[in-house]
Amino acid sequence: MIRAFAMTASVMMMLGTAPVPPSPAEQPAQTESDAQRPNQVVASELSISEALARANEINANGNPGRAAEIMREALGNAEASREADLARIDEARWWIEAERWAEALEALRAVDLKGAQPGDRAVARFLVGQVLYREVQVEIAADEAAQAPPNTEALLERAGRLRRAANAFRSVLDVDPNDAVAARNVERVRRLVADLEDQALQEAQRQQQREQLQQQLEELAQEQQNNAEQTERSQGDDEQELQDQQEQTSERTEDAREQAQQSGASQEAQDAMERAREQQARAEGALERGDLEEAEQAQRQAAQELREAAASLSQQGEQGEESGEGEGEESDEQSENASDEAEGESRNELAEALLERERRQREQRDRVRRATQGTPVVVERDW
């Protein structure tokens, strides 16, 4: 019996599937529509079977969120029973369709903590994994549509939620250690966690490069400004020295442009560096002709463009920090500690921490894989 319920949920909720349909088994036939019911009848006064019929009808009309609300209201004062557990699972499925993740988790946790049947608890745990997984997938799709890659902190926060999803799928094995779909989902989600942490590591390295590049551009801007001031003071007897200095500054600026492309610098910063190079080329040509006045003007404009490029990189870093705020709160102590540590670490230390964490998780995955081949895995849930 346990196996049947667990597999039903597994089959219905494979990762990445279309929105979750309501469970078909124990629901009564639909009754009259909302418009036909007396206005004074509210959801809290309906029996579970009546609420299910009404919610099914509303969901069929394309409003899963309202269907879930009706089911939640009807279950508010319901006594513990298997009928109530199954209705809460339906409620959770409608919340999932409406992408209202917190409400779905609330309904599922009620079944997992108080469910009368082990099979129903297994279904609830499986769906918890689905909720956490799909919530992250929706956020990733939104980032891709907006062409707004998340920063390191946001990637780590999402990895934390996916780790909780993997724990939820893994906890299904407490009830049914032979649930192959849940076991496969554990490994799938853990691979996604590893991917996100790899992205976080790469982004941390790019951010470190951008911070170094910003400092380099500020130094280049000052160097370029000094060149302009020296050109202004020149009496025309040191033109070769002025040309050599400008060529050296131009070469360092060109190197910085290559670093900007590799580090994912903003387009505004790269455009400013391009304009700086154009002014530097103008200054070099003017120095070759002996036109010190034009050379000075071009050098000063190049210095200003370099300062703007540095400012754009600084703004990019600030926007990245802001985008990491409010991404979602960690529920497990491990994720909270990781977030606090990451905030206080330098980028180099963060990269080292990510690599060490991936090593530990790889070892843990190997231990779980070996354990699931024999006896059931006892899991302390952190979701």
Image (spheres, grey):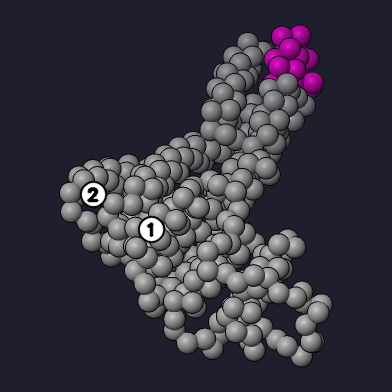
Q: Position of residue 169 (x, y in %)?
A: 38, 55
Between marks 1 and 2, how big is the CA–CA gap?
Answer: 20 Å
Could you say where residue 130 lies in the image, as x and y percent from the top left?
48, 56
Q: Is residue 105 magenta?
A: no
**Residue 284 on the magenta segment:** yes
- Residue 141, given in percent of the width and then of the height, sits at 61, 45
Instruction: Reply above or below: 216 against 248.
Output: below
Judged left or right of residue 104, residue 188 is left
Q: Amino acid at mark 1?
A: Ala
**Amino acid type of the residue that numbered disc 2 sits on in the rendered structure:** Thr
Q: Residue furthest top?
A: 289
The magenta segment: 280-295
Q: Quadrant of residue 195?
A: top left
**Secondary structure of the residue carrying numbered label 2:** helix
Query: Taking 107 as reference, is 175 left or right?
Result: left
The answer to which image quadrant residue 284 occupies is: top right
Task: Using the image, tell me which numbered label, if any, was put on residue 157.
Answer: none
Q: Residues within 10 Å of mark 2 (few under 14, many from 20)?
A: some
Residue appearing at x 63%, y 41% in the figure = 144
Q: Is residue 290 above or below residue 302?
A: above
Q: Is residue 169 visible?
A: yes
Near-viewer residue (136 or 26): 26
Q: Is residue 256 visible?
A: no
Left or right: where 67 falls relative to 380: right
Q: Residue at x 67, y 42 (%)?
A: 145
**Label 1 sits on residue:** 4
Residue that carries the numbered disc 2 in the rendered image: 372
Identify the residue at image location x=56%, y=23%. 258
